[in-house]
Image (cartoon, rainbow, N blue to C red):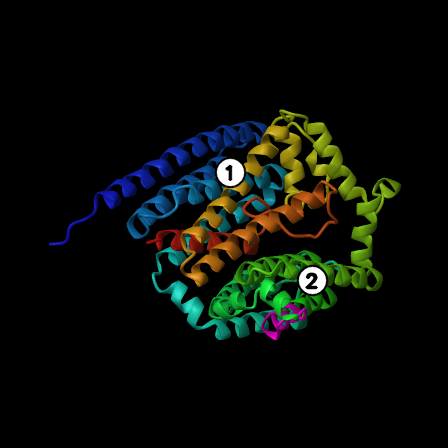
Amino acid sequence: MTSQSPFTEDIVPHTARTERVLLTIVGLFLLMNFFSLAILQQSTWQPALHFFVWVGCAIVGTSVLDRYLPNRDALLFPIVMFMSGWGVILVDRLAPNFADRQTLWLLLSTAVMLLVASLPQLLRWLRVYRYVILISGIVLLVSTIVLGQNPSGLAGAPQLWLGFGKIFFQPSEALKVILVAFLASYLSEQYPALRAESRLKQFASGQLWMSPRILGPILTMWGLSVVLVVWQRDLGTAALFFAVFLILLYVASGQTFILIGGGLLLVIAGFVAYNLFSVVALRVDIWINPWAEADGRAYQIVQSLMAFGAGGIFGTGIGQGSPTYIPVVHSDFVFSALAEEYGLLGVIVLLACVAIFVMRGLRIAVLHQDRPFYALMAIGLSMLIGIQSFLIMGGVLKLLPLTGVTLPYMSYGGSSLLISFIILGLLLRLSSEVD
């Protein structure tokens, strides 16, 4: 008969209790918003259905996680359920025709997340079969370049989706997790050699060049980013891939010069893209001065800025603002709608949620500092969410050029929601593996 340590007996109920308290608070917030939305739409069944689906996902999710991952991080799941539930409310408010579909994606995403979190061998498979996974990702990318479609059917729109009947999937979303898993596996294997080639040793020996072990991956990832910009005009995904890669390589090697050199390559790629591709030039031009074309090409970003101004500190209230003047507001500009109807307080709450998510991911990495693969996976996955959120938030606020990425867990989009929940599942699994 084996004995269980007092530490384990204490942490299991503590984790479950914390999760349940947080989910109850979140549920009350969402209930009030769904109720307000039902009054506004004069339809009770649709918001009620979406709320009860969310409740089911929360209850089943925490029950399954209690069984398979009792020692998991207690904050990650409630934070994600809060943001995803809030996202369903916003989609229901901004584009009611898409709300049912978003709710179905939430149900599917929760199920897939629980499957990912409950597979004890998944992390080992990602580490061992990294080249198989990488080749699969490259096949997805090439397939999108050759067979890509756009659900809108508009001429000239970016062809970033693969379609199967009426179901569309964006392969670049899956490629995010694939690349992080591959890089974490590769860099963890090279970790001792990378650390041995520190900048101090290079300066001491007079070697100012960068090792092929470092330079090769940098140029490869830079080339992949250029491919995404050239063939798919996917500026946001290219910037996200390269930024996350630089962070992982910097963490693995400890060489500050990597960030400087990578930043220069990113600037060079951006300069070339600006001069070659009209879509990139447009986004940079309206970033520099949108007011000159406020009723033309810069209409979207100008309306976004006006939404932030209209929201003030406390917001106009759900359904009381006019965020629908912003084109595609339920997808790329959902952050603007949130700012108008929930105000600065809502913006601060969302920023805090993203920051806590990233900090918990980095905390998991610190706890795995003796296992480089686990640590790099936690850093890469949390940085995916953090940097993607920063890119789109900065874009709609005109702090950065628009990149076209979605706001994780909040924006409408099945592919984005599904992959973001897979990231959650992997982080929960990593948090439970702490010794």
Asked whether residue 143 appears in the rendered view, the answer is no
Quarter occupied by residue 137: bottom right
Instruction: Give the answer, above or below, for where 18 lies relative to 231.
Output: above
Instruction: Label 1, secondary structure: give it.
Output: helix
Give the extent of the magenta segment: 207-220
Most common SS among magenta residues:
helix
Where does the N terminus fall, quadrant-wise? bottom left
Residue at the limit of the structure toward the front, as seen here: 204
Mark 2 belongs to which amino acid?
Answer: Gly
Q: Identify the residue at image location x=65%, y=36%.
A: 337
Tell me residue 277's x, y (percent).
81, 62
Crowd class of label 1 (few under 14; some 14 to 19; many from 20; radius 10 Å):
some
| Residue corresponding to mark 1 | 46
Q: Residue at x 77, y 62 (%)?
A: 268
Circle number at residue 322: none
Q: Is residue 110 rendered to the left or right of residue 99?
A: left
Instruction: Return the residue found at the far left.
Output: 1
Residue 141 as seen in the image, left or right of residue 153: left
Q: Tell me, yes or no, whether the highlighted magenta stretch contains residue 323.
A: no
Q: The residue under label 1 is which amino acid type? A: Gln
Q: Which residue carries the number 2 mark?
A: 261
In front of the other: 45 or 344: 344
Label 2: element kind? helix
Q: Is residue 209 left or right of residue 252?
A: right
Label 2 or label 1, whichever lies nearer to me, is 2
Residue, x 51% and y 55% (percent of image)? 379
Give me the residue at 34% from left, 61% from top.
120
Occupied quadrant, residue 235: bottom right
